[in-house]
């Protein structure tokens, strides 16, 4: 039997020498995660559909570490391939992939359009799979048995519990992404790659802005922790899942929601 190996507290959460890609990393959940990874020492590439958003986020994040921004429309397969090629073009490794880019659509069932399914499923389910496909060689090369490469898929508590809002394609897409996470975890584990999903609850973001403006106090009151999520909550889970501290966790769907989904009656 081998001797136990211990890391110092700082080593458990240190990402120095690691390189990460965070899709949808210019705002909201993605920006929170990118900031956390940078502060832990990783070099980070962020992506967004809008070039001006990339420029602004890169400027905002530059004080935390080495950050690069690349614009790409990840609802398109060819754009996923282009982003993957850009990230790996100069022989730089990739240790961490965060699939955060996503879309939602809320509309009553009577008028819910076909386009709402195509738009949401393309970005929320197909795109994460395409990004894993394209970046698998780089992730395989980066991962070891002792320190696997990491994939984080950003799901939602609406893929766990039944949303009170008419977000039919969004909720379905996030449940699908959670199951895709488990399938990939089983397949890629032997290749030294962990795959986990984070299921955020209510956080301040553009996607949640209208809902929180109208129902924010009631949503906070419904959470056992009686508040909306903070930036550090999302930064922290990103660092945990990508550091030595989270190296033995794979196939997990981690709700970060103040207990909303896990204590629902």
Image (tube, helix red, strand yellow):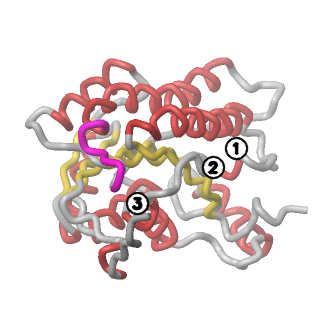
Badge 2 vs badge 3, beta-carbon distance below 8 Å: no
| C-alpha span from label 2 to label 3 | 15 Å
Range of magenta residues = 140-146
Which disc is residue 109 wearing? none
Q: Is residue 228 left or right of residue 223?
A: left
| C-alpha span from label 1 to label 2 | 5 Å
- Tell me residue 164's x, y (percent): 81, 49
In depth, the one of 110 and 32 nearer the eye is: 32
Badge 1 vs badge 3, beta-carbon distance below 8 Å: no
Q: Quadrant of residue 178?
A: top right
Q: Is residue 120 magenta?
A: no
- Of the image marks 1 and 3, the number of the one nearer the N terminus: 3
- The answer to whether residue 113 is visible is yes
Mark 3 = which residue?
A: 33
Q: Measuring 24% from the left and 48% from the top, which residue is drawn there?
A: 45
Mark 1 = which residue?
A: 159
User: In the rendered view, would you say 65 is above or below 224?
Assistant: above
Q: Measuring 42% from the left and 54% from the top, which residue is drawn there?
A: 30
- Tell me residue 170's x, y (percent): 65, 37
Q: Secondary structure at mark 1?
A: helix
């Amino acid at each position: 039997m081998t001797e136990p190996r211990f890391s110092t507290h700082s080593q458990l959460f240190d990402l120095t020498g690691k390189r990460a890609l965070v899709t949808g990393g210019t705002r909201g959940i993605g920006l929170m995660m990118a900031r956390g990874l940078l502060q832990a020492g990783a070099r980070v590439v962020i992506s967004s559909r809008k070039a001006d958003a990339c420029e602004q986020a890169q400027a905002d994040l530059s004080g935390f570490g080495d950050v690069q921004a690349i614009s790409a429309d990840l609802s398109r397969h060819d754009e996923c391939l282009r982003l993957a090629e850009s990230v790996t073009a100069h022989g730089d490794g990739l240790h961490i992939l965060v699939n955060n880019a996503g879309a939602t659509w809320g509309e009553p069932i009577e008028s819910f359009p076909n386009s709402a399914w195509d738009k949401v499923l393309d970005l929320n389910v197909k795109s994460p799979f395409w990004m894993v496909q394209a970046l698998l060689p780089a992730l395989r090369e980066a991962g070891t048995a002792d320190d696997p490469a990491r994939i984080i898929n950003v799901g939602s508590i609406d893929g766990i519990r039944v949303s009170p809002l008419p977000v039919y394609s969004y909720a379905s897409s996030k449940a699908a992404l959670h199951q895709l996470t488990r399938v990939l975890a089983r397949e890629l584990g032997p290749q030294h790659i962990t795959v986990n999903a984070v299921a955020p609850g209510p956080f301040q973001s553009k996607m949640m802005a209208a809902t929180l403006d109208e129902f924010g106090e009631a949503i906070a009151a419904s959470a056992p922790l009686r508040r909306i999520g903070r930036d550090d909550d999302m930064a922290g889970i990103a660092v945990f899942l990508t550091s030595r501290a989270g190296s033995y966790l794979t196939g997990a769907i981690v709700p970060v929601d103040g207990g909303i989904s896990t204590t629902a009656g």
